[in-house]
Amino acid sequence: MSERASIPKPEDEDESDDEQQPVTTGAQSVIRALENAGAEYVFGVQGGAIMPVYDALYDSDINHVTMAHEQGASHAADAFGIVSGEPGVCFATSGPGATNLVTGIADANMDSDPMIALTGQVPTEFVGNDAFQETDTVGVTQPITKESYFASDSDTVGDDVSEAFALADEGRQGPTLVDLPKDVTKGETDKEPKKPKTPETYTVQTEADEEMVDAAAEAIESADKPVILAGGGVIKADATEELFRFATKYEIPVITTMPGLGAFPEDHELSLEMAGMHGTGYANMAVTNTDLLVGVGTRFDDRLTGGVDSFAPDAELVHVDIDPAEISKNIYADYPLVGDAGRVLDQLYDAMTAAPDADEWREQCQTWKDEYPLDYQMPEDEPLKPQHIVETFDEVTDDDAIVTTGVGQHQMWACQYWTFREPRTWVSSHGLGTMGYGVPSAIGAKLAAPDQEVVSFDGDGSFLMTVQELSVAVRENLDITFVVLNNEAIGMVRQWQDGFYEGRRMASEYPWIPEFDKLAEAFGAAGFRLEDYDEVEETIQAAREYDGPAVIDALIDPAENVYPMVPSGGDNGLFALSEDQL
Amino acid sequence: MRPEGRRNTQGIRIDPEAEATHEPRQAVLSALVKHKPGVLAEVSGLFSRRQFNIESLTVGPTTDDEMARMTILIEEPTPGVEQAKKQLQKLVPVISVTELEPEAIRRELAMIKVDGEKPDDINAVADMYGGQAVDACDETVTVEVTGSKQKVDAAIEAFSQFGIREIVRTGTAALERGAKDTQ
């Protein structure tokens, strides 16, 4: 997919190699700012107030992917940002266009994904008059962005976009937004946008305080039961090599958070995989019993910590994060190390003089691995187990295959049963937990990494929320395999109802859902139906071999649940392995 | 084997020797911000969505046209005060944030409209609190009082004998004492 057939270009496309034409309008300045920042793709949907910007895009080499819904545009841009490491770009018009982007912006904000949203706005003279398709987009999005800008002048609108782009990328990444009134984008200007640069009030500390590094290094050296907790920040900072060097040199076991999947190879003997609500038993035992926790690029979310009173209760915490506001926000940091994850891991690597004496601890961790393996039963005469489908898919793909998901049980099975070995191969909605993230994120991921295989695990409920984006995957001929782990229910809710609401299954069962293989065919994708164990591998292979989007409707055991499980606010050391242990 | 330890709600390991929880305290934060539209909404939105207890917020221009100063009075345990400072600093239009020393100069202004039947007595009470009458008519006298929050509270209490019709109060404005800069 390195070559793309996309929107038709004007006939004089060849001239694009020539010197750039000077800008004449605010809209052209907006597009020039995106070009200068290196944007390759824009995900968006047209509309009245954004039309001048689209008109300027007509003459640009930036590829536009028209999405079916603005929510899809924001998720695709978000996923593009996760996989490429550069801000993904999405466009929408004013009013409903902008509000439809909101879920994806909030999602990017929770997961610190680099993204820039450009929204049309009614002309300045109508702002505040409740004009057609007017929404206070800056007001709506301010709490869920790093910063939302309201462009007020055609001469500076390009600068606003440049700054917003740089800000999305610098320090702790995240979404930014520029609201573009139609008169500002239509207005004349000959001002070229400034180079992308963050505002002077935005400062980022990349290197941690030396004295604190030394103190932390000493604490790690003298620990008996050290463990590293690697979060999504390790991947965002491109610090997986530094982490590997540090962990293997000093032989410290590594746990990841959910966004941290891929930060450390899960098949390495030091890996304890993922901790938290549906983490492995051994990771949760280790995080509960450690006496020194090195948290890197993690914000200690409640799905990870469970109840804070019982989280790593005997541990001193070394907390490495680029955002000072994350330090001691949820869990008190005894050794706060503000800085870039890779840089600080190198500082710690250099400051340490010996590995901690932790043979016994590592043995203990191995014992827990034997004691609490991830496990599921697979009787031949019962319906398909979703875990088996995930494992089989993992076995037939390369290590760099990218997994995207929706949100729910299927997402947890993907976390647990796929073995992540490389960074930027796990694309999911962690903090916000957005059902419907799976399909559009697969589109963004595939365009960011056309040479890597992309598989999207979804649930029937989640898939149905954004299924219309399949039309985009078909139009762009994206080679993606969608696997719907179909249990005819909004399964995670059903699981909680069975566990915590006496089995009162209110509004969680979906016996009316469509046949997804046929639905896929209606969209022009390939459709497969999977019901039996002996068809699993052959169906997966057939879907992978299809050149274009393929959907496997996998009818799984509707009774299957996600375990281990730490109930919300519970003690990680007291995880349940089945419903009767809740 | 189960660890013995526990953490409090702020994620701090509880040391049985030390205090287990932190009591809320009053803190005065002074923030220099970019003087542009939307900044007040951004700052007040931050305090509400992160559930910081805010007692008052004042904002006004500085000697630099491009900057404004906000004085924010919050009541939080120490970890909450620290978190509020860091979150505030993180907002892009915020230039700097400081927590003022407890002995910093703090002032509030109140205007108190009372029944005007005893103008001489009203003036006497106003004198006592360093205030002055700023408006009077047949029915009412309006008095202005400036001072610390405690002094303004006391003045209002004293004026209540005349029958208070209306009150308006500003929040706290504060600056460091001596040559020390507030930013």
Image (cartoon, grey):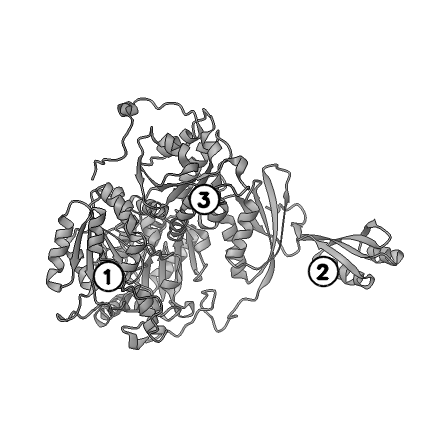
Any part of residue A454 in sight: no
* Mark closer to the chain start, 1 or 3: 3
Q: Residues within 10 Å of mark 2 (few under 14, many from 20)?
A: few
Amino acid identity at mark 3: Gly
Q: Which residue is mark 2?
A: B150
Q: Nearer the viewer, residue A4 or B108?
A: A4
Q: Residues within 10 Å of mark 1 (few under 14, many from 20)?
A: many
Question: Which chain hosts label 1?
Answer: A
Question: Which chain hosts label 3?
Answer: A
Amino acid identity at mark 1: Asn
Residue A377 lies left or right of residue A263; in this view the side is left
Query: Element under label 2?
Result: helix
Amino acid identity at mark 2: Gln
Q: Which residue is mark 1?
A: A486
Same-chain status of marks 1 and 2: no
Q: Residue at x 33, y 61 (%)?
A: A221
Residue A27 in the image: x percent, y percent?
42, 31
Residue A30 lies left or right of residue A471; in this view the side is right
Same-chain status of marks 3 and 2: no
Any part of residue A523 in sight: yes
Q: Residues within 10 Å of mark 3 (few under 14, many from 20)?
A: many
Same-chain status of marks 1 and 3: yes
Figure quadrant of the N terminus of chain B: bottom left
What is the C-alpha distance between the residues marked 1 and 3?
Answer: 35 Å
Q: Quadrant of residue B169?
A: bottom right
Residue B20 in the image: x percent, y percent?
50, 70
Question: Which chain hosts label 2?
Answer: B
Q: Which residue is mark 3?
A: A95
Q: Nearer the viewer, residue B140 or B174?
A: B140
Residue A222 lies left or right of residue B108; in this view the side is left
- Say whether marks 1 and 2 touch (CB < 8 Å): no
Residue B168 in the image: x percent, y percent?
72, 54
